[in-house]
Image: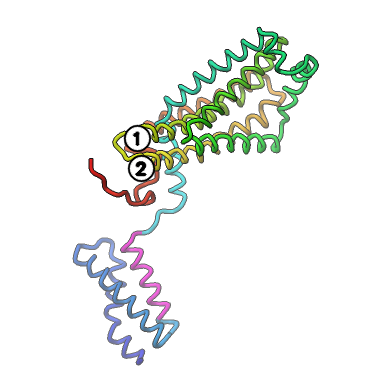
Amino acid sequence: MDLDAFNAVHSAEWSRLEELTKKRSLDGAEADELVRLYQSVATHLSTIRSAAPDPVLITRLSDLLGRARTRIAGAHEPAWRDVVRFATVSVPAALYRIRWWTVTIMVLFVGVAVISGWWVATNPDALASMGTPAQREQYVDEAFASYYDPGAGFASMVWTNNARIAALCIALGISGVFPAYIMFANAVGVGSTGGMMAYYGELDTFLTLIAPHGLLELTAIFVAGAAGLRLFWALIDPGPRTRGRAVAEEGRALFTIAIGLVVVLAVSGIIEGFVTGSSMAWWLKIVIGAIALAAFWVYTIVLGRRAVQAGETGDLTADHAGDVAPVAA
């Protein structure tokens, strides 16, 4: 192939395509021309590569086609914008939509914990089930407080363990059984421990060591349980959607929560690892925990309400979620 002749015949098209890619705005005819020239130049590049592979011309046309493709399809937003949108729109929207589920689980959890604690503190048989007298005294006097060993290692251990539990509550929530069991078992465990500490006159120690990190940590677990049960409810009562579509949409939105809870539990893990077992005054520890909890609810309610009012659910955007088959209303 005569490359010079080929260049002379088609250079006007290449120049015109370059001109269109540089224009700030295009009318309808110019947009159509841009697409047509893009297709033609792509054919030219393919021909040159196969018949007369000149590296300079190949580089020029490849660059031109890349800019034209960007102009046609649009440039993808930088990744940090996706992260910001996820943190300020998707996560709070998903959290806001299950806020009443979260509050309901919190109330039930506290109720079960108080009943369990009262039962252990007032019933000798229940107290005996917590261990022998020597074991109970050792736990109350030493083990409970020594568990909160300040440091990064302890914080990371707590974080990964709680994040795993939260993820399992959401992932297995469709069963309806696992999150309910986890919530009940944890409520009984926390309440029973508190009841035993109260029996030995150490309820204040229990509360001051649990409260700093527990306010946020337990709230995150409540959220995980609420998300799991909400997924189960989507299976039971999908509303106007098909059951499969309801589970898919709610599942994607609730896994948004699972990712968000990783950050929430990281914060509670830092508090547990560096605040709970530290030498700070007990009231300052509780204030730190209360501020973290307040920040979580402000984030959920303020940003979440705004996002939901704008039509967000925490699900993937339409271009990422995939096509939905039309169904009869």
- Looking at this view, is 12 or 323 the one in front? 323
Q: Residue furthest top?
A: 122
Identity, as a three-letter code, of the amino acid under mark 1: Pro
User: Can residue 89 be seen?
Assistant: no
Q: Residue furthest right?
A: 134
Q: Which residue is label 2 attached to?
A: 245
Which image quarter holds the C terminus? top left
- Looking at this view, is 115 or 139 the one in front? 115
Confirm or deny contact between disc 1 and disc 2 (CB under 8 A). Answer: yes
Q: Position of residue 227 (x, y in %)?
A: 46, 33
Q: Position of residue 50 (x, y in %)?
A: 40, 84
Q: Is residue 262 left or right of residue 51?
A: right
Identify the main secondary structure in magenta.
helix
Q: Is residue 66 magenta?
A: yes
Q: Which mark is residue 37?
A: none
Q: Position of residue 247 (x, y in %)?
A: 40, 40
- Give the secondary structure at mark 2: helix
Q: Is residue 121 left or right of residue 20?
A: right
Earlier-in-chain disc, 1 versus 2: 1
Q: Which residues are magenta?
A: 58-74
Q: Looking at the image, which residue is at 43% across and 40% down? A: 251
Q: Residue furthest bottom?
A: 2
Residue 102 versus residue 38 in the image, above or below = above
Compute the Cα span from label 1 to label 2: 8 Å
Q: Is residue 136 magenta?
A: no
Query: For mark 1, does the 10 Å Cα neighbourhood hold few (<14), some (14 to 19), or many (20 or more) residues?
Result: some
- Looking at this view, is 25 or 65 the one in front? 65
Would you identify the image quadrant in which residue 22 lies? Answer: bottom left
User: Can residue 133 be seen?
Assistant: yes
Identity, as a three-letter code, of the amino acid under mark 2: Arg
Q: Which residue is label 1 attached to?
A: 238
